[in-house]
Image: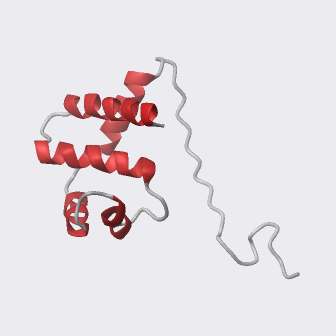
Amino acid sequence: MMLLLNKAESLINAIIAKIDGISKPRQKFIKHLLSLYMGLRGKYNFINMARYGSFNEKTYRNQMEQQFDWAGFNVEIVRSNCSKELILAYDPSFLPKSGKKTPDVGNF
């Protein structure tokens, strides 16, 4: 598990270093946030991030208000780790959570 976390952190460091216009504190926060996402239990909200992370809840809220190019970050991860032959798929289907349209749910 530690080896996987170290590989993920080194990958995150390499990709964030390629992105221009990010301050050092913002880089530190993004690195922390992505590492936290890998180990966070339960819901992904600011209260849980403050509980399991190393920043205050307000810090998470303020940092998330700032712009970050997540699409560019994901593209860079794919480019650095995948072959040139890629397939992009999008599934726009939606299933209601409950009610008459939920399959295999009924009164017993």
- Horizontal and vertical percent position of residue 47: 34, 70
Using the image as rendered, state which of residue 76 and residue 43 is in the foreground.
43
- Horizontal and vertical percent position of residue 2: 43, 36
Identify the residue at the far right of this view.
108
The number of callouts visible is 0
Identify the residue at the far bottom of this view.
107
Identify the residue at the far front of this view.
2
Describe residue 23's horizontal placement relative to residue 27 as left or right: left
| Residue 71, quarter of the rendered image | top left
Residue depicted at 21% across the width and 28% down the height: 18
Q: Name above or below for residue 20 compared with residue 28.
A: above
Q: In this orientation, does residue 93 appear?
A: yes
Using the image as rendered, state which of residue 89 and residue 6 is in the foreground.
6
Describe residue 89's horizontal placement relative to residue 18 as left or right: right
| Residue 40, quarter of the rendered image | bottom left
Residue depicted at 85% across the width and 82% down the height: 107
Residue depicted at 38% across the width and 66% down the height: 48
Q: Name above or below for residue 37 compared with residue 16.
A: below
Residue depicted at 58% across the width and 52% down the height: 92
In the picture, the quarter occupied by the C terminus is: bottom right
Using the image as rendered, state which of residue 97 and residue 24 is in the foreground.
24
| Residue 13, quarter of the rendered image | top left
Q: Name above or below for residue 40 compared with residue 26.
A: below
- Horizontal and vertical percent position of residue 105: 80, 73
- Horizontal and vertical percent position of residue 62: 19, 63
Describe residue 21's horizontal placement relative to residue 76 as left or right: left
Q: How is the image coloured?
A: secondary structure
Q: In this orientation, does residue 23 appear?
A: no
